Amino acid sequence: MTKFEIFVIAIILIVSIISDLYLRRKLAIPRRRIFWYKTVNNSHKWGERIISFTYIIGAIILIYKDLEFVFLVKLMFTYFFILFLFRTYMEWRYDSENKEYVLSIVGLVYYLLLILLFLIFSN
């Protein structure tokens, strides 16, 4: 990675953190634990487990097929995108009064920007 690419990624991460703090204050959303995510309900928990299990199986298959590292990175980006999308939907559908889903949508947009930057810079 060049210095410019690292700079752009750092700017996106800083803007993401600042917008998260601003939206939490503006929408009166309480801070959550940093390293532990609390699911909305039991189906949310099992949905995330199924998505994670599918990712692990896919990664193992790709590793044993001796594919390039880029395929694993793309699989990882796809996994996190699907996971964040699922979390956003579950938060919106079952816990909309908490407004945590707004932060998830904003985070998903920043994550999409990072994916696009990776795809652009990897070529």
Image (cartoon, rainbow, N blue to C red):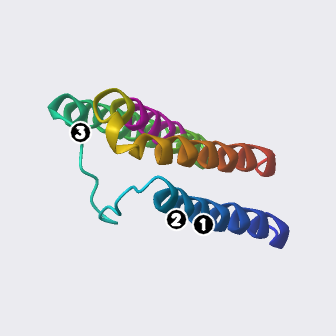
- The residue under the point 69% across, 68% down is 10
For this rendering, which residue is in front, 33 or 72?
33
* Residue 18 tag number: 1
Q: Secondary structure at mark 2?
A: helix
What amino acid type is highlighted by mark number 1? Ile
For residue 102, side relative to residue 36 (left or right): right
Quarter of the view holding residue 58: top left
* Image: magenta residue range: 78-89
- The residue sitting at the bottom extreme is 3
Horizontal and vertical percent position of residue 93: 34, 26
Q: Main secondary structure of the magenta part?
A: helix
Disc 3 crowd, CA 10 A, few/some/many (<14, 14-19, 20+): some
Horizontal and vertical percent position of residue 1: 76, 65
For this rendering, which residue is in front, 114 or 27?
27
What amino acid type is highlighted by mark number 2? Leu
Q: Secondary structure at mark 1?
A: helix
Residue tagged by mark 2? 21
**Label 2 or label 3, whichever comes before in sequence order:** 2
Residue tagged by mark 3? 40
Residue 1 at least partly seen: no
Q: Nearer the viewer, mark 2 or mark 3?
A: 2
Residue 86 among magenta residues: yes
Could you tell me if the residues under marks 1 and 2 are in contact, i.e. CB atoms within 8 Å? yes
Q: Secondary structure at mark 3?
A: loop
Quarter of the view holding residue 11: bottom right
Q: How far apart in space, not on screen, are marks 1 and 3 (Cα)?
A: 25 Å
- The residue under the point 69% across, 46% down is 113
**Label 1 or label 3, whichever comes before in sequence order:** 1
- The residue under the point 39% across, 32% down is 92
Q: How far apart in space, not on screen, are marks 2 and 3 (Cα)?
A: 22 Å
